[in-house]
Amino acid sequence: MRWCSSSRWRRRYNATSQAPSPPPLTLRTDRLGERAWLYSGFANGNVLALVADSGLLLVDAQSSKRVASLDSALQRLPRSDVRTVINSHYHPDHIEGNALWRPRGARIVAHEAVRLEASTDTIIAEYGNWHRTPLPDAAMPTEWIRDSLRLLLGPDTVRVLHVPSAHTNGDLIVRVTGSVDLLHMGDVLERAAPPFIDWWAGGTLDGMIQAVERGIAWSTDRTVVIPGHGPMTDRAGLARYRDMLVTVRARILERPAGASMDTTMADAITAGYADQLGGVRSARRFASIAHYGMSRDVRPSPSRPPSASATKTLAGGTIVIFGGQRQEPGARPPLDELWELSASGWRQRSSGTR
């Protein structure tokens, strides 16, 4: 999610506001391989589309206001029927579009923490009275990931990994190998813009750094790295982003306890990084939100504990909770569940070399 001022935030996410219409959508299309396309543009999350003989897989689903434009663009692909959507996290500009794909039969996959965060109706007074409104039932995911998942999609292997307490407490990053070499970081990575840490949904700066380090360890020098917003980068660009986060954290920790944020302090915290963060004003906003969470006891929202049953019903859909083992930072992600998308749907396979 793009970081914006509290007034713009309220206009954008408060369902009762009288916000002006968003600017005209300019949707950019980049072909990343024979079977992979990226859809991006001003104020839009980056949506990755992977084409297989059995249909499309999307990483992220766009907002409700812009999903129709994405749908129109997808009609020009060899296959336009969306079979699976992976939501990187719960923020509306990445998940509201589910309501278009789900009635068409798409399976919507998200981390299990999204069940709680997307259902929340609360006002965050500390953040300009940000009104977090519940996601409509029609847009709710249908399947949930606990830690990791591996999918076979034609010649490609899609690996999905939960990175805890990062941008939110329910972030997924997605690695694609085979005919392409891609890593979609969701809003754990934003380029030419200030990162947003959703402290009120379990996000932390420490977790952001650990998530980026996982992405670095999971990629190669050939990997195309896709941020949640902004232009694509590579493994070296991801490392520079990590270094910026580490430096900002260290500078905040050096400040006296109880020090209040002002422009002088914000400029000192982000010195040398204004261009990377989208300009001086954007850099100040990032310093402010990072300092806020690190200097206060912001209680994160806990993930809703899963039941012992593997299958549940929510919002009219069948919920499959995929498993996986908790991994330590830097460890190889557990990929113990392997699923393949065929013309008849998803089926589980025994683990193999892919």
Image: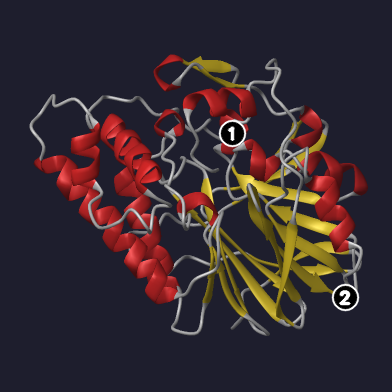
Q: Would residue 208 appear left or right of 249 to someone viewing this image?
A: right
Query: Does residue 315 appear in this view?
Result: no
Q: Name the amino acid type tagged 1.
A: Ser
Residue at position x 85%, y 58% in the image: 82
Residue 12 visible at all: yes
Say what amino acid the circle numbered 2 marks. Asp
> What label does residue 53 carry, if any?
2
Q: Residue at x 25, y 58 (%)?
A: 272
Callout count: 2
Pointer 2 with pointer 1, Cβ within 8 A: no
Q: Residues within 10 Å of mark 1 (few under 14, many from 20)?
A: few
Q: Which circle marks residue 307 in the picture?
A: 1
Q: Position of residue 253 (x, y in %)?
A: 14, 41
Q: Residue at x 55, y 64 (%)?
A: 231
Q: Quadrant of the C terminus?
A: bottom right
Residue 155: x and y, percent?
Answer: 73, 83
Vertical order, 94 against 236 (above or below): above
Coordinates of residue 180 in the picture (x, y in percent)? 64, 81
**CA distance for labels 2 and 1:** 35 Å
The percent coordinates of residue 238 (x first, y second) are 40, 67
Query: Which badge, 2 or 1, comes first in the chain's sequence?
Result: 2
